Image: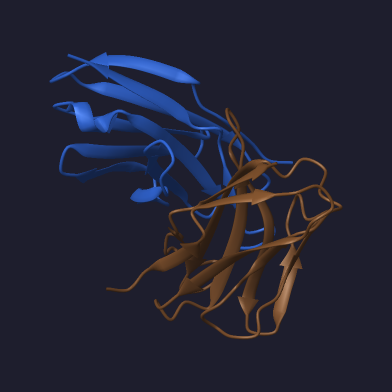
Amino acid sequence: DGGITQSPKYLFRKEGQNVTLSCEQNLNHDAMYWYRQDPGQGLRLIYYSQIVNDFQKGDIAEGYSVSREKKESFPLTVTSAQKNPTAFYLCASSPTGIGSNQPQHFGDGTRLSIL
Amino acid sequence: GQNIDQPTEMTATEGAIVQINCTYQTSGFNGLFWYQQHAGEAPTFLSYNVLDGLEEKGRFSSFLSRSKGYSYLLLKELQMKDSASYLCAVRDPGGGADGLTFGKGTHLIIQP
């Protein structure tokens, strides 16, 4: 079955540590996205990529970094510069970017907590 | 800027009908999506509206009025499994990414 796989499901970060969240899709989608979801808040866009080897900052990119070396993969690194990383992180993909009527498909999320 | 408003929480009874409203103010408009999200899980796509009117899909229907910046999601014959958060998202072609901005979601509680 095609889908989006995020791992790990739960992740703990020590102070000063960088951690990387994995996102893999086998839907052959061009565009991929990372969102952060906090309690009582909507999804906020961290980074997005419309094509391999290209990505753009979203609304809350500070303290995060991404790479898009393969179409299927869009890992997110939460750096030590992100002072409040505790949140639910969602990865999504869609067939095309701007102007598409296709919905974004989401992975099951990674819950990140601070030790 | 972009602003999307939804009620924070609603309560309804099993077997009944509930309407979840969404109002939006965006610089542009290129479609509105509704997603369902159970606690701790991924949002799943429910419906898409780009033209005015009602889109029906089984027990779920979604309505759009572009002139009023207004949409609603109508859930009929409510079941306990419908207890979830419902997210309204607007696609604004002037926005980043694919211009998708999400509301904060409406937490729907179904009572027996």
Expressed as whole percent of the image width and height from the top left, the position of residue A35 reads: 61, 52
Say which quadrant the N terminus of chain A sits in. bottom left
Residue visible at 39% across and 40% down? B37
On screen, A9 above or below B71?
Answer: below
Chain B visual colour: blue
Residue visible at 32% across and 73% down? A2
Tally of marks: 0
- Quadrant hosting residue A107: bottom left
Expressed as whole percent of the image width and height from the top left, the position of residue A109 reads: 49, 53
The chain letter of the brown chain reads A
Q: Nearer the viewer, residue B100 or B112?
A: B112
Expressed as whole percent of the image width and height from the top left, the position of residue B71 reads: 42, 34
- Quadrant hosting residue A41: top right
Residue visible at 53% across and 35% down? B69
Left or right, B76 with reference to A10: left
Say which quadrant the C terminus of chain A sits in. top right
Residue visible at 34% across and 33% down? B73
Expressed as whole percent of the image width and height from the top left, the position of residue B27 reads: 68, 46
Left or right, A109 with reference to B52: right
Q: Is residue B92 visible?
A: no
Left or right, B90 with reference to A13: left
Q: Is residue B17 visible?
A: yes
